Image (cartoon, rainbow, N blue to C red):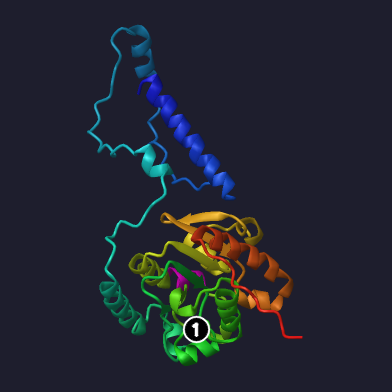
Amino acid sequence: MDASERQSLIRSVRQRLESLARAGVDRIALPEIAPPPAREKPSIAAVKVIEMAPAVPIRPVAAPRPVAPPVSSRSLFEEPKIEEPILSPDDRVAALATLAADVSICVRCPQLAESRTQTVFGIGSPTARLMFVGEAPGADEDRLGEPFVGRSGQLLTDMITKGMGLSRAEVYIANVLKSRPPDNRPPMREEIAHCLPYLERQIEIIRPEFLCLLGKSAVTALLETVLPMNRLRGKWHRYRGIPTVVTWHPSYLLRQPSAKKEAWEDLQLLMQAMGLKAPDRQKPAS
């Protein structure tokens, strides 16, 4: 590698690290590298031979080892993007229906499969520009088979309609888990791992322009970070090349109404990027 290539690589690495820092990432997990195989300590006799005849170094004959392909620096620092082709609206409907059928018979999590009434796949437009991702279905969602239909669902609807001037039919709403955890407990790590491929496939099919992650479970699943919410919200992130905003889950807002102001600020980030204007609020008649 010549000097110009080395300087170009350094600039790329520096720019990528600065971008990660602006997004709130303060550490990067690197793959573990296996240590080189230990070499046998040379015998005293061998050392003496080397010292007596330095011009003729003794090299042990070893069997050829497989050489790993070189790792491209671009693959380490570029955002992974969705590689699947974009589907037509009709094909998206069909693909989502097929995926929903697979979800409905999923038993990867035996406890959830046994306790649920039905799976809760997702709802909204297959061509939505914006997709909301929550945590898991609750009792109302489990009963009706639709995400965000209880008290937190009504609040999310108000955020979408009264806050952003959209309808639920214009966006797409899904959860990380497709089955209700017993007693509405938080999802377990293995449950998220089992269900995540379904959510990832939903995103691949719908191909939204923007993502809004509601709460820590959705953030942990898609952004793979353990940073606290207050370090993540209020700024842009990316999931497979899709601009992504993080905000509080509606159920948290019901418990902490003072956080609604912060959620509104997060929605305004989305609205500005999407070119949306908040609907006019009519004043009550005097």
When the figure is inspected, residue 275 is found, relative to residue 66, above or below; the finding is: below
The C terminus lies in which quarter of the figure?
A: bottom right
Q: Nearer the viewer, residue 285 or 83?
A: 285
Q: Position of residue 122 (x, y in %)?
A: 42, 79
Camera sees residue 26? no
Query: Can you tell which quarter of the image residue 161 is in?
Result: bottom right
Q: Position of residue 126 (x, y in %)?
A: 36, 74
| Element at label 1 | loop
Q: Nearer the viewer, residue 99 or 152?
A: 152
Q: Position of residue 108 (x, y in %)?
A: 38, 77
Camera sees residue 38? yes
**Residue occupied by mark 1:** 180
Rendered residue at 36%/20% (across/down): 2
User: Which residue type carries mark 1?
Assistant: Arg
Query: Can you tell which quarter of the image residue 95 is in?
Result: bottom left
Q: Is residue 190 magenta?
A: yes
Q: Nearer the viewer, residue 106 or 211?
A: 211
What range is drawn magenta here? 188-193
Rendered residue at 53%/90% (across/down): 140
Query: Can you tell which quarter of the image residue 82 is in?
Result: bottom left
